[in-house]
Image (cartoon, grey):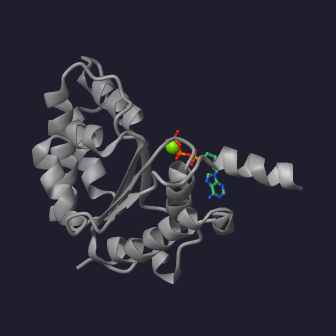
Amino acid sequence: MVERGPMSEGLPLGLDYDHHPMVRRAAEQVVQWFNHVMRDGRALVLIGPSGTGKTHIVTRMVQAYGPGARYLTESGMVGDLKTGMSRNALWTPDDLLRTWNKDLFLVIDDVGVAKVNEAAWLHDVYWQILDGRFEGKRPTVLTSNKVYESFRNRLGSRALDRLLDATNQGDGIVDMSMIPSYRLIGRKEHVGE
Ligand SMILES: Nc1ncnc2c1ncn2[C@@H]1O[C@H](COP(=O)(O)OP(=O)(O)OP(=O)(O)O)[C@@H](O)[C@H]1O
Ligand SMILES: [Mg+2]
């Protein structure tokens, strides 16, 4: 059983909901599922094009959670693991994976962008992280601006299976593809002013 964290009071997303009905719809799904994620140690995925507010939302989540939350980008995660493989490294990749599995709340932003030579290696990394976290009922949020097919291929089938379990077969996957880039909506607003 995971203790209710500081997020139980509500999640201040800081989004301009009124700009677009799809923003409002996505925000409602995020907030609704997020409470479940934090309470029951499940997963939330934000997937959609660039500029739709994914990093904005996860940054607010991490800030609101406070100590015990970790924000990683996929590129940062891969870079840290590669550093851990070098001979004089102060930590090993296994040390990192253990640490990330224990984090009370983990965000991995920008799934699909890191430069990786071996897809199978990254599949194993995602498997270890997601399997470990969901076994321990630890809440996890992923974002990606790739299409769903690429996102799936990035995780690999074993990790994806775990993720689907942890999102109730997709209830916790928020499709942001109908939201126009915030910069474009913002520009329209300014033109109207
Ligand atoms: N609905 C919104 N309300 C307020 N600000 C927003 C909203 N959506 C996006 N923004 C702002 O627009 C900018 C781009 O958003 P963000 O970086 O979160 O996009 P993203 O979905 O993470 O894109 P990428 O896939 O390229 O990483 C940021 O400054 C963010 O704060
Ligand atoms: Mg982003």
Task: Identify the residue at horizontal 16%, vertical 48% (top origin).
Answer: 159
Q: Nearer the viewer, residue 5 or 192?
A: 192
Q: Is residue 161 visible?
A: yes
Hey, which quadrant is residue 94 in on the image?
top left
Q: Nearer the viewer, residue 187 or 12?
A: 187
Pick out the residue farthest to the left.
Answer: 158
Please, is residue 10 above or below residue 112 in the view? below
Query: How many marks on residues?
Result: 0
User: Is 61 left or right of 91, judged from the image as shown?
Assistant: right
Q: Quadrant of the C terminus?
A: bottom right
Instruction: Give the percent coordinates (x, y) of residue 22.
Output: 54, 63
Task: Identify the residue at horizontal 36%, vertical 72% (top origin).
Answer: 38
Task: Identify the residue at horizontal 56%, vertical 69% (top origin).
Answer: 24
Task: Identify the residue at horizontal 33%, vertical 57% (top origin).
Answer: 103
Please, is residue 101 above or below residue 32 in the view? above
User: Is 3 left or right of 30, judged from the image as shown?
Assistant: left
Hey, which quadrant is residue 95 in on the image?
top left
Instruction: Give the percent coordinates (x, y) of residue 39.
Output: 33, 78
User: Is 189 left or right of 8, judged from the image as shown?
Assistant: right
User: Is 54 left or right of 149, judged from the image as shown?
Assistant: right
Instruction: Give the percent coordinates (x, y) of residue 185.
Output: 69, 51
Instruction: Give the percent coordinates (x, y) of residue 114.
Output: 36, 28
